């Protein structure tokens, strides 16, 4: 079987939708949206409806939905809770549909919908995710959410970790400089991942707002084997 | 004196003109535009007029200007020569004004003109450039040309090398993830720079077209102390 193409995109602003019609797109926003989404499914959430606009989330709330919504790390006043994975407990989410809107993560999910399939990646589900990607026949694009369209370290390092496993499987090839650089940054970060992430701007942002208590958790490898996937406008954990 | 801000931008598509009105913008496109421009001034060129569109370059040619113009590595049919630094010899360029249009490099120069000042950086002038940047009072943005708006390794590594010298001077601070990542990639690349650049997609592109003969030269540290700067619509080496 010919090798499949692996590419990485460091920012939604660099994403070229037409180039990935047959690719599985992996959305990576580890501090904190993609980690929170993986946690929600690990704790039994039925589905997650990502919405880009706060106003849309507010409308869902008025219809009785459970709503997670934040901007720049702070919970929106009408929401049930914000963006920390620690909010998505079994007690709150089991069997529920959650409407979810964050600064970066949800807009980018909608952006990628022209691709073959959109899934959610993080360190929390990296083992299950990469085994599944290897078992498929599609090209893969790792799409980092970044921070307000800018490159960020934490998503890049996670994309490098995923790329490293895919390339090691021998089922993928890459001529993408972003993938090569991400793998090198992962090689540099992996001996002390929390120490490396500590250099990132988002780490400082969360620390300044006392929102950094979940970072260690977000760096946990293989916390869950759930792979959130977009189907009919909602994320489900049912590939 | 308070420390000045150092930022890095991996692609023209990520450049936010309004954020850099008081910054010196360093354009980095080492394979091959920024290296060729530094070489031209090292060999005595009087000035270089960057034009984004091939058609504009053709009009200058019809007025009798010396024209360097390429697209995707190939010389345009009306041009005197293309984009290799080896074209910009003393015999050809001394005392001359050159009109210059390339795939990536010249469009990005025009993009940055709202900043305080636009200069050209490469390994060829890295010593003189960094000494001068340190001696100024301005924030600095390292703007990588990339490849058709994508991240590329060679410009990133050069920006990391420049950033490393600026940060070491103790006159700059950064909270920019791109700068931190670029410095780490430079640390990884510097023990064997040609070997590292060999992994990049542009290296393969140039090799496939037999245009890679100048890569070793483009990685030469401190070939010249000229710092090309935009003044009144043209690059000159007169700060």
Image (cartoon, coloured by chain):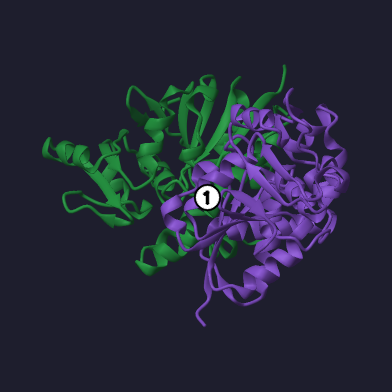
Chain colours: A green, B purple
Name which quarter of the figure residue B229 lies in.
Answer: bottom right
Residues A227 and A181: in front is A181
| Residue B53: x %, y % from top left | 58, 31
Residue A166 horizontal side relative to residue B19, left or right: right
Q: Is residue A91 above or below residue B201?
A: below
| Residue A8: x %, y % from top left | 59, 37
Residue at the image point whose x is 45% and y is 59% from the top: B21
The local secondary structure at tag 1 comes to: helix
Q: Is residue A206 above or below residue B210?
A: below
Question: Residue most toward the bottom?
Answer: B1
Residue A82 horizontal side relative to residue A113, left or right: left
Question: Residue most toward the top?
Answer: A1
Visible residue check, residue A2: yes
- Residue on which disc 1 sits: B112
Residue at the image point whose x is 40% and y is 63% from the top: A206
| Residue A210: x %, y % from top left | 35, 67
Q: Is residue B191 above or below residue B137?
A: above
Q: Badge 1 local density, few (<14 within 10 Å), some, or many (20+)?
A: many
Residue B134 horizontal side relative to residue A121, left or right: right
Q: Quadrant of the C terminus of chain A?
A: top left
The chain identifier of the residue carrying mark 1 reads B
Visible residue check, residue B11: no
Residue at the image point whose x is 48% and y is 26% from the top: A17
Count of numbered badges drawn on the protein: 1
Q: Quadrant of the N terminus of chain A?
A: top right
Residues A181 and A196: in front is A181
Residues A2 and A223: in front is A2
Question: Residue most toward the front?
Answer: B63
Residue A79 horizontal side relative to residue A174, left or right: left
| Residue A192: x %, y % from top left | 63, 62
């Amino acid at each position: 079987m010919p090798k499949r193409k692996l590419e990485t995109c460091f920012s939604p602003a660099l994403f070229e939708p037409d180039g990935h019609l047959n690719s599985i797109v992996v959305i990576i926003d580890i501090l904190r949206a993609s980690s929170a989404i993986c946690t929600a499914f690990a704790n039994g959430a039925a589905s997650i409806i990502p919405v880009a606009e706060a106003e849309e989330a507010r409308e869902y709330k008025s219809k009785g939905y459970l709503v997670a919504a934040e901007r720049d790390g702070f919970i929106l006043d009408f929401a049930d809770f914000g963006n920390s994975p620690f909010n998505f407990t079994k007690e709150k989410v089991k069997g529920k549909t959650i409407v979810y809107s964050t600064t970066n993560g949800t807009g980018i999910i909608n952006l990628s919908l022209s691709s073959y399939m959109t899934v959610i990646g993080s360190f929390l589900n990296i083992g299950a995710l990469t085994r599944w990607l290897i078992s498929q026949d599609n090209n893969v694009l790792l799409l980092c959410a970044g921070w307000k369209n800018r490159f960020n370290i934490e998503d890049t390092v996670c994309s490098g970790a995923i790329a490293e496993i895919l390339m090691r499987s021998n089922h993928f090839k890459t001529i993408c400089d972003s993938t090569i650089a991400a793998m090198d940054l992962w090689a540099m970060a992996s001996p002390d991942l929390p120490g490396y992430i500590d250099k990132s701007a988002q780490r400082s942002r969360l620390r300044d707002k006392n929102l950094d208590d979940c970072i260690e958790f977000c760096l946990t490898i293989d916390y869950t084997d759930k792979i959130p996937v977009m189907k009919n406008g909602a994320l489900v954990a049912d590939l």
